[in-house]
Image (cartoon, rainbow, N blue to C red):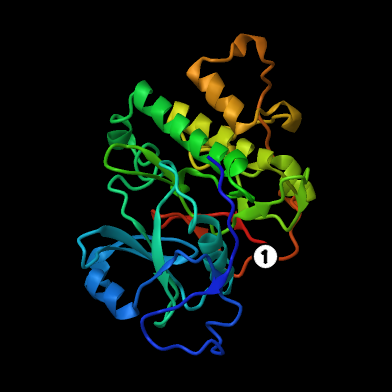
Amino acid sequence: MRFSFSCSKCFSSSSDMSTDSPSMQGLQILQNVHAFSFDELKVAANGFRSSNKIGEGGFGSVYKGVLQDGRVVAIKMLSAESKQGHREFMSEIASVSNIHHENLVNLHGGCIDGPCKILVYSHMENGSLAQTLLGGEENRARFGWETRRGISLGIAQGLAFIHEEIKPRIVHRDIKASNILLDKNLCPKVSDFGLSKFFPENFTHVSTRVAGTLGYLAPEYAISGRLTRKTDVYSFGVLLLEIVSGRKATDDFDPVLGEHNLVEKEKCGLRPNMSKAIKMMRGEIDIHNTKITQPGFIIDIMDVKIARKPQSSGRSITGRRSPRLYPL
């Protein structure tokens, strides 16, 4: 199924707010985004108490809440000090507010009438892959091969949907374990579209500042800034290695001891698109007839195309800092 959509009206709230106010200027979103009041979300999250806090990242804090209609939600607050976060807030609303897929996080709406900008998502009972599968031996035991295969397929299907089945196409740019959430049935949901980019259908690539997380960045994109949908495919490949091995791409290795990263090197031209990757995982394509090479790795971080250091480093949902690059 294909969808066409465009940004068409300003975000509105139940409270009176002038369209000339700084928080409203230029803030356009899709028509079907629901506007929550700040007071409504404050009640839902029990006053945003620490006991309701379920995660924290470069964007800000995430709280578990219960809406008046009984829906359990994750309330994602933009840090007031985060200058980068405003751009991510806008990108996330524009990307996911009008698309729906079983393997994409479901956005219920947002709020701009309080001290912070807020996004409201469905709550995922099993957290992220970073917390569970990669979060320790006690969690890893829950994931048999069939479960890992199902998670991998679900992620691939979500990416194929945004790459190939909607207009305009979307490139996520930050596929990693902490951005894959799991519901109560361990169904994966691709989340955090704050760095995503719309991709014109007839373009071979888009030149942009590099954004993403080191360890998941496609080498050719990190060096040249030429963004394609294959950039996400590379990140998915790294994530797939993590799912299969149960090891993190970088954190589990000690270079002092001569250990290397999970990823070594890979040729961009040999990466399949996401729909072909799905067929390979389903056994619909004979992978023995497909040339597979070793994956890729950025040898020198100084080769990465970036204009300046980020003002605040990224942080995974577990609260651990992860190296993340941001566009200007």
Where is residue 312 shown, x and y percent of the image? 56, 67
From the viewer's perspective, tell me whether residue 187 is left or right of residue 225: left
Instruction: Assess disc 1: are there few (<14), some (14-19) or many (≥20) residues with their C-alpha within 10 Å of its C-alpha.
Output: few
From what the image shows, is residue 37 above or below residue 170?
below
**What amino acid type is highlighted by mark number 1?**
Lys
For the point 52% across and 67% down, the residue is 89
Where is residue 106 shown, x and y percent of the image? 40, 53
- Which residue corresponds to mark 1? 309
From the viewer's perspective, tell me whether residue 74 is left or right of residue 176: left
For the point 53% across and 68% down, the residue is 29
From the viewer's perspective, tell me whether residue 97 is left or right of residue 263: left
From the viewer's perspective, tell me whether residue 129 is left or right of residue 99: left
From what the image shows, is residue 59 above or below residue 273?
below
For the point 64% across and 51% down, the residue is 168
| Quadrant in which residue 36 is drawn | bottom left
| Quadrant in which residue 293 is drawn | top right
Disc 1 element: loop
From what the image shows, is residue 136 above or below residue 59?
above
Q: Nearer the viewer, residue 213 or 116?
A: 116
Q: How many marks?
A: 1
Where is residue 300 shown, x and y percent of the image? 74, 45
Residue 214 can be seen, yes or no = yes
